[in-house]
Structures are given as structure tokens and as C-alpha cells.
């Protein structure tokens, strides 16, 4: 039937309606031009649209990408492309890099920025998407702690073991491997005794490889409430070994918000 969302009716009278998220409910607040509901997407994804000025705070709002299990696989910040202190619609744009090798479908969640933290002011536009399955996959290793690296004097806190992850083939393989590391171990890996010493929610702000050294900058979440020489050593080892699997990386320099001195001190 000619309608939006699309609908069809079977010969026996049953109706089926396409899931387009909550787009029609939010059309007077926020509108998305790319991707459209149920569009097939691949990484990197450019998200564009327009939202009323009160959807932003300080000219931005967060966008999250969830897999079919509701797990967050990417996050980005949409930036206003014009004056945002208005009640009119303002264009926005954001770019997400992601790996969704194990999911066919997902959801893009464009959240209203809510600095108050009060739930009554929360709002979001939810857009169902389909992940492209045409990517050639590649294997990377990520390094996690094991019972052998437990915080005990008899063990080496730096001891980590690799697990393999399948990701879409990409030129930015070092960053993709780190992003896999930051996701933490899977339920199956946890059941096998693997764990991570890295805080959840850590974000990579910048990574570059120059003359054999990988320079990687994280946000402050990397150091949040991190104490004890054993845990610090474990975090360093996880990051360094994950990056050193690549032949172009001989050394690793870790920074937090651009600061290299006194980073990850016990």
C-alpha cells in the first residue's frame, strides 16, 4: 500500500507495518536526512539532519549506535551547523565509526542534550538501521587480564592474553583494535576468566602512528578512580600489547586530554 511507513496486507487480511522508529512522533522536534529509517549503513557513517535549538546544549547533542542486542557500539557528538540558541530548526552533522560484524540490524539514537540530568527532560529520536554485510572482515587481537595477572605478589600484573575479534577491513586498524579493547570482554570471555582493568566508557580522542611510535590520547575516564600500581600496570599492558601487534608500532605513548606527564600513576 502507498503509505509512510510502508504497509502491506496479505490475502487473508493481515496487515504489516514497517518499523520506522519514532520519527513521526518527533518530526516537530528533530528530523534526520541521513540515514533514513531502515537504510543500510557502513562505517564511517555521516549523520545529518536538523533539530530545534532546544534539542542542543552548547551547540551539540549525543548520538549513539546500538546493535540488535541493545549494546552500544559507537557514540558521537552532533554539532550544530548554525546558531543554536533559537527555537527554529538548526542543521546538524556527526560522523560515527563503528564495527558491527556480528549484527544485522541496529538502532541510531539521537538524544536531546539534557544538562539537568532530570529524566523528565530526556528525549530521543530512534532510527532503525541495517548494517552492511558486504565488508571484508579482518582479524585483530585485543589483550585482557586473566587470573594469572590478579593483584597478588605471586603473579605478574602486566600479564595479559590475546583474544581474536573479527572486524570490517579498515585502514584505521590500530584504532579499531583499541575500540574493540575498550568494549571489554564478551560474556563468553568473562566465563573463561578474562577481565579488563580499563574503566568502561573510555573514549579515544586521537591516535596517530609516527616513525614507529603510536601516540594515543584518551579522555579523562581512563584515569577515573584508578589506583594501585598493579591495576595501572595492567591497563598500560592491555593498551600497549594491543597496539604492538601491528608491525608499524614499536613503542606506545599514552596521553589523557593531551597530557603525557603523570598519566596512569598509582
Image: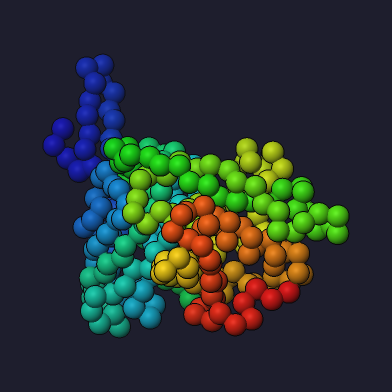
Where does the image place residue 123, in percent across and percent down from the top left?
Answer: 42, 63
| 217 left or right of 88 in image | right
Name the foreground residue: 71 vs 225. Answer: 225
On screen, residue 154 above or below 257: above
Name the foreground residue: 186 vs 253. Answer: 253
Where does the image place residue 85, in percent across and percent down from the top left?
Answer: 30, 83
* Residue 152 visible in rendering: yes
Where does the image place residue 190, in percent across and percent down from the top left?
Answer: 67, 43
Q: Identify the residue shown where x is 53% and y is 57%.
A: 244
Where does the image place residue 168, in percent across and percent down from the top left?
Answer: 37, 44
Name the foreground residue: 18 vs 179. Answer: 179
Q: Identify the residue shown where x is 23% and y is 42%.
A: 5
* Residue 126 visible in rendering: no
Q: Within the image, what quadrant is residue 259 found in?
A: bottom right
Tell me, what colour scheme is on the image? rainbow
Q: Within the image, what quadrant is residue 20 found in?
A: top left
On screen, residue 190 above or below 172: above
Give the total of numbered labels. 0
Q: Identify the residue shown where x is 65% and y is 73%.
A: 264
| 27 left or right of 251 in image | left
Q: Quadrant of the C terminus?
A: bottom right
On screen, residue 140 above or below 220: above
Q: Identify the residue shown where x is 47% and y is 54%.
A: 246
Amino acid at each position: 500500500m502507498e503509505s509512510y511507513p510502508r504497509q502491506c496486507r496479505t490475502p487473508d487480511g493481515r496487515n504489516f507495518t514497517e518499523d520506522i522508529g519514532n520519527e513521526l512522533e518527533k518530526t516537530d522536534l528533530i528530523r534526520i536526512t541521513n540515514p533514513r529509517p531502515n537504510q543500510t549503513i557502513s562505517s564511517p557513517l555521516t549523520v545529518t539532519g536538523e533539530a530545534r535549538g532546544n534539542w542542543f546544549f552548547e551547540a551539540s547533542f549525543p548520538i549513539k549506535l546500538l546493535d540488535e542486542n541493545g549494546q552500544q557500539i559507537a557514540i558521537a557528538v552532533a554539532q550544530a551547523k548554525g546558531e543554536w540558541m533559537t527555537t527554529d530548526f538548526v542543521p546538524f552533522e556527526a560522523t560515527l565509526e563503528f564495527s558491527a560484524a556480528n549484527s544485522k540490524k541496529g538502532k541510531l539514537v539521537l538524544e536531546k542534550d539534557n544538562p539537568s540530568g532530570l529524566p523528565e527532560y530526556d528525549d530521543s529520536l530512534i532510527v532503525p538501521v541495517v548494517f552492511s554485510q558486504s565488508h571484508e572482515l579482518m582479524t585483530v587481537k585485543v589483550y585482557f587480564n586473566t587470573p594469572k595477572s590478579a593483584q597478588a605478589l605471586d603473579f605478574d600484573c602486566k600479564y595479559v592474553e590475546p583474544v581474536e575479534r573479527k572486524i570490517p577491513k579498515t585502514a584505521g586498524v590500530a584504532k579499531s583494535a583499541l575500540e574493540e579493547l575498550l568494549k571489554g570482554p564478551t560474556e563468553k570471555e568473562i566465563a573463561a576468566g578474562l577481565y579488563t582493568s580499563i574503566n568502561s566508557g573510555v573514549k579515544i580522542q586521537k591516535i596517530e602512528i609516527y616513525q614507529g611510535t603510536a601516540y594515543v590520547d584518551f579522555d579523562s575516564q581512563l584515569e577515573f578512580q584508578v589506583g594501585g600500581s598493579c591495576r595501572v600496570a595492567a591497563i598500560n599492558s592491555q593498551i600497549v600489547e594491543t597496539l604492538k601487534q601491528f608491525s608499524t608500532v614499536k613503542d606506545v605513548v599514552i596521553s589523557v586530554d593531551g597530557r603525557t606527564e603523570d598519566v596512569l600513576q598509582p
